[in-house]
Image (cartoon, rainbow, N blue to C red):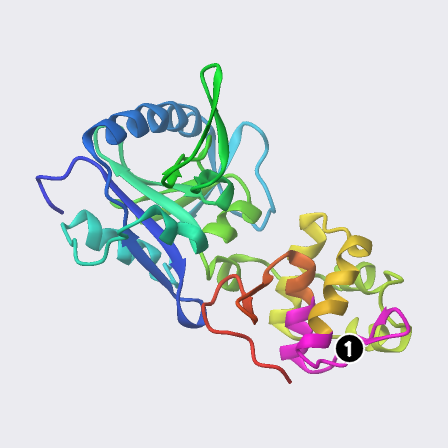
């Protein structure tokens, strides 16, 4: 850990097969002071929540935060941030435009806390050239990219205790690429029955799916059920990706749930909002490798 550093920001990007790349985000003195003031407020609020062990709940109560001891760091996010805190400067972004595919921003500011503060990132936080914005009483056009930080923390990680703390699974899984592969519990039989009884699924295939013993399918079903995903509004997206990936899983306005786990996972991730298109390719949000058509 570098003794000369008093503020470090890292940007998390999806790497190959669910791993993560963490790149440094340089802040000048004024930006560090402004960000530190906001982070101090957020940490004061987050740290006063009651810490309770994560027991498979999707989200904590309003006065609680969930804690995982001996956190595994499966995707290498923590290891990447440790390198930045240690003074590594070779991997840094050179422009805010590079944050287009960023998943999360990590902050370490020992004047506030010795923990890594985690914020989920979205493109809405990136103001790009050409957009209009309000400045005092005037409207101006942005001539270069600007970055704002989120208004709340998604979680924190204790470097000393190796514990991860967060408020809900949905937010932390968006920030940490491999979180749900290890820590999302599987669906119960009752969950599978409820999920596959939805009329969006073709009846025969859904009856078979109810007996699935795939842990990967079980975790994704649990996530979809708890996310509150609207199946009806997501169906058009399933149709779209089914067609361009040649999955042959939609017939007569019904999802014929595939026995093939790879295709089934894509359908469930579409329902979760984990699949997107870019430059003619299809990607999962936790990988920078394009999904190949079947």
Whether residue 8 sits left or right of residue 185 in the image: it is left
Residue farthest to the bottom, as pictured: 294
User: Which quarter of the rendering shows the C terminus?
Assistant: bottom right
Question: Which image quadrant for residue 256?
Answer: bottom right
Q: How many marks can you see?
A: 1
Q: Percent x, y for residue 26?
A: 23, 43
Magenta segment: 243-267
The residue sitting at 16% across, 53% down in the picture is 89
- Residue 261 part of the magenta-drawn span: yes
The residue sitting at 75% across, 57% down in the picture is 234
Q: Which residue is mark 1?
A: 249
The residue sitting at 78% across, 61% down in the picture is 235
Query: Which is nearer the eye, 94 or 158?
Result: 94
Q: Percent x, y for residue 245?
A: 66, 78
Does residue 178 lie above or below 173 as drawn?
Answer: below
For the question of whether residue 59 can be seen, the reply is yes
Q: Percent x, y for residue 155?
A: 43, 41
Whether residue 20 sits left or right of residue 292 in the image: it is left
């Amino acid at each position: 850990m570098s003794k000369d550093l008093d503020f470090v920001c890292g940007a998390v990007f999806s790497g190959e097969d669910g791993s993560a790349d963490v790149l440094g985000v340089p802040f000048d003195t004024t930006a560090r002071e402004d960000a530190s003031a906001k982070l101090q407020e957020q940490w004061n609020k987050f740290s006063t929540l009651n810490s309770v062990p994560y027991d498979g709940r999707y989200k904590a109560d309003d006065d609680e935060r969930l804690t995982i001891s001996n956190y595994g760091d499966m995707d290498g996010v923590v290891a990447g941030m440790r390198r930045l805190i240690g003074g590594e400067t070779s991997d840094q972004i050179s422009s805010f435009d590079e944050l287009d595919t960023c998943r999360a921003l990590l902050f370490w500011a020992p004047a506030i806390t010795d923990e890594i503060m985690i914020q989920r990132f979205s493109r809405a936080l990136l103001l790009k050239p050409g957009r209009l914005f309000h400045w005092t009483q005037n409207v101006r056009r942005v001539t270069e990219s600007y970055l704002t930080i989120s208004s709340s923390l998604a979680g924190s990680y204790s470097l000393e205790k190796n514990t991860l703390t967060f408020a809900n699974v949905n937010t932390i899984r968006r920030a940490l690429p491999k979180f749900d592969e290890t820590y999302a519990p599987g669906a119960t039989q009752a969950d599978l029955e409820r999920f596959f009884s939805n009329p969006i699924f073709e009846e025969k295939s859904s009856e078979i799916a109810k007996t699935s013993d795939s842990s990967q399918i079980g975790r994704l079903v649990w996530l979809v059920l708890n996310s509150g995903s609207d199946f009806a509004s997501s169906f058009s997206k399933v149709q779209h990706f089914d067609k361009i990936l040649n999955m042959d899983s939609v017939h007569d306005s019904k999802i014929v749930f595939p026995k093939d786990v790879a295709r089934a996972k894509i359908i469930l991730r579409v329902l979760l909002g984990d699949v997107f298109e870019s430059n003619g390719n299809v990607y999962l949000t936790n990988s920078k490798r394009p999904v190949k058509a079947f």
